[in-house]
Amino acid sequence: MQAILIEDVKGLGHAGSVVNVARGYMRNYLEPRGLAEAATPARIAEVQRTQEQRAAAREKKLAEDRALVDLLGRTILTLKAKAGGDGRLFGSITSGDVSDAIFEAREVRIDRRHITVDPPIRTTGTYEVPVDLGEAGTAEVKTIVSPLLDE
């Protein structure tokens, strides 16, 4: 008997997949627990359409993220921070600061958790800050840290 899984079932399949199971397993275990439903031709077609839509959306998102990786790779950020005479910052540049600078420069919001500033930037200079966008890749954003001039 064919069944459509509503939730992931260990050893059987993932949610949304059509699997062959014994009638008793379906009737006594899967259906009462709300893990699966009987597969009709209409539901199978609906599940396939949904899977195709998800795959298309995933491909579109991946293409957008790859374009974003390319854009960020061409981005040069200039951050100003209070610094002493020897170039040491009073504080440090964090991933949140880099995220805000990317938003100001490109009007693209990047979650600070995707930006790795390790070790923290504590001196003026030029740095390559990696921005990880998952499957799309990692962009190296050139970041120039310069002292904030008091007037």
Image (cartoon, grey):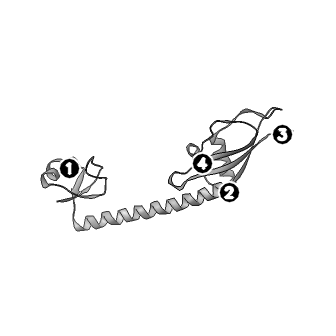
Q: Are marks 3 and 1 in contact (CB under 8 Å)?
A: no
Number of other residues with Cα within 10 Å of mark 3, as a class: few under 14, some 14 to 19, many 20 or more:
few
Q: Specify whether residue 21 is in view.
A: yes
Three-letter code for the amino acid on which mark 3 is drawn: Leu
Looking at the rendered structure, the kind of residue marked 4 is Val
First in residue order: circle 4 vs circle 2: 2
Tell me the element at label 3: loop
Q: First in sequence: mark 3 or mark 1?
A: 1
Callout 4 touching callout 3 (CB < 8 Å): no
- Lower sequence index among marks 4 and 3: 4
Q: Is residue 147 left or right of residue 31?
A: right
The image shows residue 74 at horizontal and vertical percentages of: 68, 57
Q: How far apart are labels 4 and 3 at the CA level?
A: 28 Å
Residue at x-position 55% and y-position 61%:
64
The first of marks 2 and 3 along the sequence is 2
Which residue position holds label 2?
A: 74
Element type at mark 1: helix
Q: Name the residue under label 3.
A: 149
Q: Compare marks 4 and 1 and give the one earlier in the sequence.
A: 1
Q: Where is residue 132 in the image (x, y as percent from the top left)?
A: 56, 48
Residue marked by disc 1: 30
* Mark found first going from the N terminus, 1 or 2: 1
**CB under 8 Å between discs 4 and 1:** no
Q: Name the residue under label 4.
A: 131
Classify mark 2: residues with Cα within 10 Å, few (<14), some (14-19) or many (20+): few
Residue 38 sits in quarter:
bottom left
Distance in Å between CA atoms under marks 4 and 1: 43 Å
Which structural element holds mark 4? strand
Identify the residue at image location x=35%, y=66%: 49
Q: Which of 151 and 112 is in front in this view?
A: 112
